[in-house]
Amino acid sequence: MKKEAISDIKELLQTPKKMVIVPHKNPDGDAIGSTLGLYHYLKMHNQDAVVIAPNDYPEFLKWMPGEDTVLKYDSNTANCDMLIENADVIFTLDFNALNRTGDMEQALKASKGLKIMIDHHQQPDDYATYMYSDVRMSSTCEMVYNFIDMLGDKALINPDIATCLYTGIMTDTGSFRFASTTSETHRVTAHLIESGAEHSEIHNAVMDANSFERMQLLGCALTNLKVIPESKTAYISLTQDELNHYNYRKGDTEGFVNYALSLQNIIFAAIFIEDKQNNIIKISLRSKGDFSVNEFARSHFEGGGHTNAAGGKSDLNLQETVEKFISILPSYNEALKNE
Ligand code: 5GP
Ligand code: MN
């Protein structure tokens, strides 16, 4: 972020303002961790801040400090519209384009509130007055830490801020194992632990909160796992009936795609999940090395994300979507073989 931007934002924080903080739709650990981490920080500056999520998020994030204050746009639209319209400042975190907020997009576009983006996704849109965008970052939580640091406020990081930021760094780095994890990420994390993040408790709260039914659904997903060796690709599909059978709850399929990627000699993995309510197939893509699933998702499935983790959707049915995927793969065989 430019020096001028930092001094402008410092100035902004001098007096109380109405501030809204927004994560992307279907928020994950990094989205909720970064928005709540920033929320606790803005509170230290006596700001009238609120986090508005486009929709609900998984139970395994519902223990985070301040989580009970998060408003959900889809179930509280009139109130949220008013807050967005009257906001002096709108922080948009962990996404690169306003359409990633789903039905909130119009309200955000219409609001005269000054917009500040903090995000690590590729190809950011140009809607914010102040933009802190860096695709090399492990997580938006690491960037919120840097943002606080740039404002000269590292000393203000309390256990609530530290806990929220630690959570998002941990989830977005796959517990510090993805290539995006740097020595700097570990330095930031070390300081968060020193500032009161209880790393083992956080890990347990997020990772060891499985329901029996989720484990059974994982068993079903692994049974459905298919491998295409010539493309070094593996994929999983789940029908709505299968989800219903195991009493699917939001977040239950989080991480399933990584089991496909964990196979020997596989560098590209996908999961296709039928969503009858929205009449789409939700797709998650993962890769190893330089093969860009961001490009793949953009080119074929109306999505995007990062080089090694991206998502998208399809309006075809589940079988047609999988067939489309399989038919596209051969054109990537060269790229996949070279990885
Ligand atoms: P996941 O597969 O865990 O839902 O998402 C992986 C990454 O891709 C995340 O960074 C997420 O923000 C991004 N992503 C997921 N779905 C979409 C989508 O439909 N559009 C775009 N642009 N990005 C997505
Ligand atoms: Mn993120």
Image (tube, helix red, strand yellow):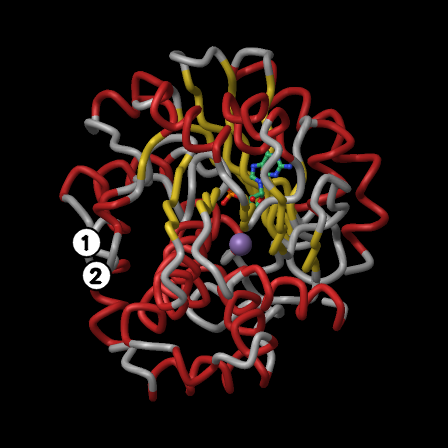
| Residue in the picture at 62% in, 33% down | 112
Q: Position of residue 210 (x, y in %)?
A: 20, 50
Task: Measure the alpha-carbon separation of dots 2 and 1.
Answer: 6 Å
Q: Secondary structure at mark 2?
A: helix
Q: Quadrant of residue 196?
A: bottom left
- 90 is higher (above) or lower (below) than 303: below
Left or right: residue 21 compared with residue 249? right
> Which residue in the rendered view is the most extreme toward the front?
15
Q: Position of residue 222 (x, y in %)?
A: 37, 41
Q: Position of residue 249 (x, y in %)?
A: 25, 32
Quadrant assignment for the C terminus: bottom right
Whether label 2 touches label 1, CB < 8 Å: yes
Q: Nearer the viewer, residue 315 or 33?
A: 33
Q: Position of residue 179 (x, y in %)?
A: 62, 70
- 254 is higher (above) or lower (below) than 101: below
Left or right: residue 169 compared with residue 151? left
| Residue in the picture at 21% in, 46% down | 68
Quadrant assignment for the N terminus: bottom right
| Residue in the picture at 75% in, 68% down | 4
- 156 is higher (above) or lower (below) than 126: below
The residue that mark 1 highlights is: 209
Q: Nearer the viewer, residue 84 or 286?
A: 84
| Residue in the picture at 85% in, 48% down | 334
**In this figure, what is the number of numbered marks?**
2
Numbered label attached to residue 205:
2
Q: Nearer the viewer, residue 23 or 13?
A: 13
Say which amino acid is labelled 1: Ala
Q: Nearer the viewer, residue 33 or 230?
A: 33
Say which amino acid is labelled 2: Ala
